[in-house]
Image (spheres, rainbow, N blue to C red):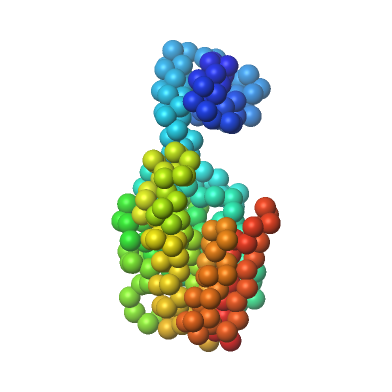
């Protein structure tokens, strides 16, 4: 069955055909991939049918995470559906920066703008146990998934989920504001891999003509929502650091820098008012 799946996925142009086939067959068997590779399962007709349906979906370039319904991020397991962006390893750079910043701040107030699956909010809450997190999203479907992920990891009592277009209502100020906003220019959407272009929510990827539309809004809104010694940290696309830092300077942030991810790409812009 693994060889059948590998062949089908290879024909579909999927580079990780063998690995994907293993993950799908393990999911079809309701066991771990390690158990599958240990040959610790007896195949039956239901498993085979389930596996072939999964392979057919993956051959249509549906993301693996949507097919199995989960994705690991920051060593935590998250539910994902087509209503949310699939968490990426590079976003862990943003979480690491945030955790370093709040480490000595006790009950730090943290705002996660555009929370999606809740990956950033939950990862912060699970690793900064005194932090209080507010997580916003414009999509009620996304917020429902984020809430379930917080409940799954038993940190829902420290995360407040709010439906909002970027910032929550009120005058609460935060120690740190985080966001992984859409940052792909509209003209670049057509060139994306079909997994992203055809399956992930356009609401979470498309960012206007120049790809920095959301950073303009975040930069403009942050000064009135940050504590005087607070910071804003945003994930960026490759090559966007200079433009995004300029936006924060224009908004009154005098101190900004870019942090590279493990691939050496400038991935996070961090800015402070003073």
Q: Is residue 132 visible?
A: no
Split into 4 quadrants, where in the image is the N terminus? top right
The residue lying toward the viewer, choosing from 147 and 181, is 181
The residue lying toward the viewer, choosing from 39 and 174, is 174
Q: Position of residue 35 (x, y in %)?
A: 62, 26
Labels in figure, total: 0
Residue depicted at x 57% and y 80%: 272
Q: From the viewer's perspective, is residue 273 above or below residue 13?
A: below
Q: Position of residue 30 (x, y in %)?
A: 50, 28
Q: Position of residue 223 (x, y in %)?
A: 46, 82
The residue lying toward the viewer, choosing from 118 and 61, is 61
Residue depicted at x 57% and y 76%: 271
State the image quarter where residue 205 is shown.
Answer: bottom left
Split into 4 quadrants, where in the image is the C terminus? bottom right
Q: Position of residue 248 (x, y in %)?
A: 51, 77
Residue depicted at x 57% and y 70%: 242
The residue lying toward the viewer, choosing from 230 and 249, is 249
Residue depicted at x 37% and y 51%: 202
Q: Is residue 12 visible?
A: yes
């Amino acid at each position: 069955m693994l060889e059948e799946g590998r062949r089908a996925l290879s024909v579909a142009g999927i580079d990780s055909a063998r690995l994907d086939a293993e993950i799908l067959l393990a999911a079809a068997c309701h066991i771990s991939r390690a158990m599958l590779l240990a040959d610790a399962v007896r195949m039956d007709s239901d498993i085979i049918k389930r596996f072939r349906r999964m392979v057919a979906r993956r051959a249509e370039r549906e993301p693996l995470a949507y097919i199995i319904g989960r994705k690991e991020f920051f060593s935590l397991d998250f539910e994902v559906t087509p209503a949310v962006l699939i968490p990426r390893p590079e976003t862990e750079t943003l979480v690491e920066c945030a955790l370093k910043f709040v480490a000595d701040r006790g009950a730090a107030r943290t705002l996660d703008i555009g929370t999606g699956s809740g990956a950033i909010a939950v990862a912060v809450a699970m690793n900064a146990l005194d932090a209080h997190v507010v997580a916003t999203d414009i999509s009620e479907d996304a917020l429902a998934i984020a809430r379930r992920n917080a409940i799954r990891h038993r940190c829902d009592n420290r995360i407040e989920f709010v439906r909002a277009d970027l910032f929550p209502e009120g005058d609460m100020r935060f120690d740190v504001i985080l966001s992984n906003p859409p940052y792909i220019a509209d003209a670049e959407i057509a060139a994306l891999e079909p997994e992203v272009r055809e399956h992930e929510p356009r609401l979470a990827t498309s960012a206007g003509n120049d790809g920095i539309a959301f950073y303009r809004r975040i930069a403009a809104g942050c000064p009135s929502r940050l504590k005087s010694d607070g910071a804003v940290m945003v994930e960026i696309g490759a090559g966007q650091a200079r433009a995004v830092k300029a936006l924060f300077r224009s908004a009154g942030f005098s101190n900004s820098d870019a942090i590279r991810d493990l691939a050496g790409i400038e991935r996070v812009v961090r800015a402070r008012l003073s």
